[in-house]
Amino acid sequence: MAAPIKFGILTVSDTCFNGTKADTSGPKLNEEIKREFPNSQVIFHIAPDELPSIKECLLKWCDYHMCDVILTTGGTGFSPRDVTPEATRQVIEKEAPGLAYAMVARSLAITEMAMLSRAVCGIRKKTIIANLPGSEKGAAECFGFIKNAIPHAVNVLADRQDLVTKEHVTIQGISLEKVGTISPSKVKLDNVAARNRISPYPLVEVSKATEIIRRECSPTLEIEVIPFEKSANRILAEDVLATEAVPPFRASMKDGYAVKSEDGVGNRIVREVAAAGDMPSEEELKAGEAIRISTGAPVPPGADAVVQVEDTSIVETSTDGTKELSIEIKVAPICGQDIRDIGSDVKVNELVLKKYDRISPAHVGVLAVLGKTEVKVYKRRAVGVISTGNEIKNPKDNVGPGQIRDCNKFTLLNLLKKYYYEAEDCGMAKDDPDSMKKALHAAFSKNDVVITSGGVSMGEFDVLKQVLEQDFDAMIHFARVNMKPGKPTTFATCSFAGKTKVVFGLPGNPVSCGVTCLLFVIPTLRHIERSAVIDFPIMNVIATALENKDNRPEYQRVRVYQQSGVTTLLSTGNQTSSRLNSLVGANGLALVYNYVIPKNSYNNSRLSYQVMLFDV
Ligand SMILES: Nc1nc2c(c(=O)[nH]1)N[C@H]1C(S)=C(S)[C@@H](COP(=O)(O)OP(=O)(O)OC[C@H]3O[C@@H](n4cnc5c(N)ncnc54)[C@H](O)[C@@H]3O)O[C@H]1N2
Ligand code: MOO
Ligand SMILES: [Mg+2]
């Protein structure tokens, strides 16, 4: 889920509004936006060429929907009803003439008629509004002329200092290292007055954080051979080809009689019995004969159909009445009926299991069918989990005043288990550097990936980063992410006993810890293990607007469900980072951008949300 820009596309046209003409410019702009900014969110509206209607939509999108960019298309020309620039002017607080100029200047190179544009561009609060021409071609061209400036303009308006600095650095051609955006916190606990008051770590977007993690964590190269019956949930390190056909002989699909179809209906002499497990008969079936056969038994040579017992009747029995001598076939058999041909389930040399597949229970069954008793899988990294904090107690111990029970470790261990990773409980660390160092040392001795919770924010006792840098010479790749919950999420690597160790310093708040485990840790373990599927599925769900009063994109816990055949979602309630119950019953994380439900107004807006689906 990349750093997204929220766009509004407002088509202004009487004919599109009253339905006499299809709107093609709005969809075209949407197409262009999705190509240039694949993670963007787009909302749409069609307004008539009426100033109040245009103005109402612009105000709503700026003030309530908090769009980053609104593109209008239409109503910018000389015709008497063209009033989009007038409506825009009544909404904006500052003009942005450079954008309008860029569009006119570059359009003039295409058509002289560009001089007739009266487009207005400007800013209201944190929203950029740009009037584009009404024609599909003109709108797309003009969007193309301004698109490169949009991300920087949005970052400046949103006050994303780190991204703005980065862009300035790029524009000025200075390397980021020289600017020194990351400076480790070297403050000692005995000198609290000298601590950082502003975090020295830049705030990175979730997409950037993911990119950094993927860059730092290489997929494993190590393979091991394990017994097939223990292989469930591991990642296959080989393609598995069938060495034999399934079924290996022509097998009956019914309990009944093997016959020659050309004999049609009528009486048959019952020759012998073919039961499942019997050696295939070598004797050819003759015309007028039938062989009693059971499901799964080899069909004798010469038979080309099986007739189920229900479609037959007894004609003649042995004198004691116990044996069938002849029967009547009552329904004409069709050639091939109820026979599984050799290799009809699996052919020899067929690719049955693919490298990088996660071995499912059915896969294990297929391995058994094929007699593949050992299988190559990718080795897993050992994972350890540590809880930190002076106030944190083991749930089985007495909890004194000011203390709370550890829940993060149990959520983490079980969340990992749910997604097939067994992790080691590496105990607890106190909020002091020595205790943290000891716990990390013990965890690194046995594990490659260490997950901690707590102690990563701005508190004087939040010592994880300091200990990682000073005692383990770790590289902190990021320590603040533009997300809610999970802002202080920290990711570091270090070398320990000649091996690279990966550290996820998750925030202490229980929801922040669970959500960041889902968003960052589990996909990373899958990436390291070379799983073909790394990310959780994401789907778009339209639902009643969710409120997010924070500027950070929020991963709200929701329940996605079907209602009258339509997929929608329901919030799990209070979304505060400490309320672990917001994760209980959730099966999705809906990405919600800053949106405040208007006061004294009925929340009837419906918006489309990107929802990451999971199962806890
Ligand atoms: N000055 C600032 N303060 C805070 C900021 C900030 O940017 N500036 N960020 C806030 C955010 S956002 C979060 S999230 C938390 C993260 O804090 P830490 O990772 O440092 O975690 P702690 O301070 O140790 O604990 C936070 C909270 O969670 C409880 N906790 C911790 N571990 C567990 C556990 N294993 N089981 C249950 N509960 C746990 C702890 O008692 C605290 O209540 O920082 C904000 N502060
Ligand atoms: O980001 Mo914190 O994780 O809001 O609670
Ligand atoms: Mg803290």
Image: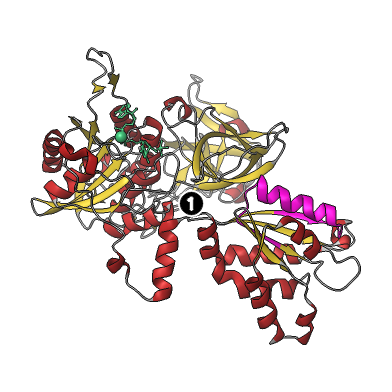
The x and y percentages for residue 330 are 66, 36
**Residue at (61%, 64%) from the top-left corner?**
33
Residue 396 in magenta stretch = no
Q: Nearer the viewer, residue 201 or 314?
A: 201
Task: Note whether residue 601 is visible.
Answer: yes
Badge 1, how many Cα within 10 Å: few under 14, some, many 20+?
some
Q: Amino acid at mark 1?
A: Gly
* Vertical placement of residue 154 versus 372, above or below: below
Left or right of 201 in this view: 592: right
Q: How many marks?
A: 1
Which residue in the rendered view is the most extreme toward the left? 497
Q: Nearer the viewer, residue 300 or 365?
A: 365
Which stretch appears magenta? 44-71
- Kindly state the secondary structure of the residue where label 1 is placed: loop
Residue 50 in magenta stretch = yes
**Residue at (22%, 52%) from the top-left corner?**
493
Left or right of 317 in this view: 482: left
Q: Quadrant of the C terminus?
A: top left
Left or right of 510 in this view: 608: right
The x and y percentages for residue 522 are 35, 44
The x and y percentages for residue 205 are 43, 53
Q: Which residue is mark 1?
A: 302
Quadrant for ligand 3 reads top left
Q: Nearer the viewer, residue 140 or 448?
A: 140
The x and y percentages for residue 378 are 25, 51
* Vertical placement of residue 203 versus 408, above or below: below
